[in-house]
Image (cartoon, grey):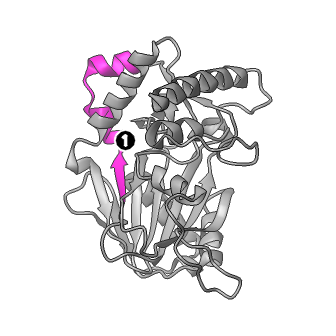
Amino acid sequence: MKVKPLNQHAFGACVTDLDLASIDAETLDAVYQALLRYGLLVFPQQNLDEANQAAFGEKLGTLEFGGLLLANQVKQEGGSFSDVLPTSSHRMKTNIGNEAWHTDSTYWPISSKCALLSAVRVPAVGGETEFADMRAAYAALTPETQQKIAGLSAYHSTEYSQANDLGHFPQRRPDSLYHGEAYLRPLVKIHPETQIPSLFVGRHAFGIPGLSRRDSRALLQQLVSDAVSDPARIYRHHWQVGDTVLWDNRALLHRACPYDYSVPRVLIGTRVAGEPASELAYYPEDPAAAGGRVALDEELKHLRRENAE
């Protein structure tokens, strides 16, 4: 196994000379230690399928989901793909929403530990995935800003982010991404393993308790804008078929890049759930959840009104 830091970036590494589909315990530990150090690992020419990727992901922790196709097409039983989905479809609206900076699963009770993507079909132009190092972003804040945001939290919801970013108000269903809950999480996250602080914000975050709506929105937008303003803190991955990328959701933001949506783009996604001790906000049945529901409904009222103007 060889680990080579990505050139001109403050984080990330390319890892070669290993097979993720048949990784042994010693190499797995080396991979995980590299993940904690670099935050992002790129594995060229792995050519994982859904089953192999899920099996590797399970070695990293409890799976939130295994080998899930993240695509603008639907895979048929025989393995072929349907026609490209229209941008008006529910799935594509969700996909397009992911073109804004975010961290995975902050909108669930337990946010994600890490995640994997592997390329199956990729467009010739566009469709990259960008990553931002939020450890370095926090370190770059002035002491005054660090002090200002210490102790502050924000609610996280996909209903909010879709409405705010796209004017999309999906139907609420308890078994979907749009479940009516909002989870309160600190703006500054202390990594449970490295103890390194990072900014924990992104498109799903809204409604900082104790601040006005105007001040909350301005602060969250400014934090993200400043975090991604330095090219050294950003890595754009240009996908090649067979690539696998692994990243630490506790330390990075990421987003998809636009492309011609009439062209097929198929990635395999696997998400590893975080440890409840560090990643659990609360469960829907907990008394604390009521505040999130109230905050979300109030915010959606504002967004519906603004969207209608």
Left or right of 12 on screen, residue 185? right
User: Quick one: SS at disc 1?
Assistant: helix
- Which residue is at the front of the view, 134 or 159? 159
Residue at mark 1: 134
Main SS, magenta residues: helix
Q: Is residue 169 above or below residue 93?
A: above
> Is 138 within the magenta?
yes
> Is 31 within the magenta?
no
Q: Is residue 244 above or below residue 105?
A: below
- Which residue is at the front of the view, 125 or 45? 125
Q: Is residue 238 above or below residue 64?
A: below
Residue 248 at x, y percent in the picture: 47, 52
- Disc 1 residue type (three-letter): Met
Residue at x 40%, y 45% (from the top left corner): 101
Residue 113 at x, y percent in the picture: 56, 49
Residue 206 showing in the rendered view: no
Left or right of 34 on screen, residue 279? right
For the C terminus, the image quarter is top left
Q: Quick one: label 1, few (<14), some, or many (20+) residues within 10 Å? A: many
Residue at x 47%, y 65% (from the top left corner): 31
Q: Which residues are magenta?
A: 128-149
Residue 229 at x, y percent in the picture: 23, 41
Residue 234 at x, y percent in the picture: 28, 51
Residue at x 51%, y 39% (from the top left corner): 161
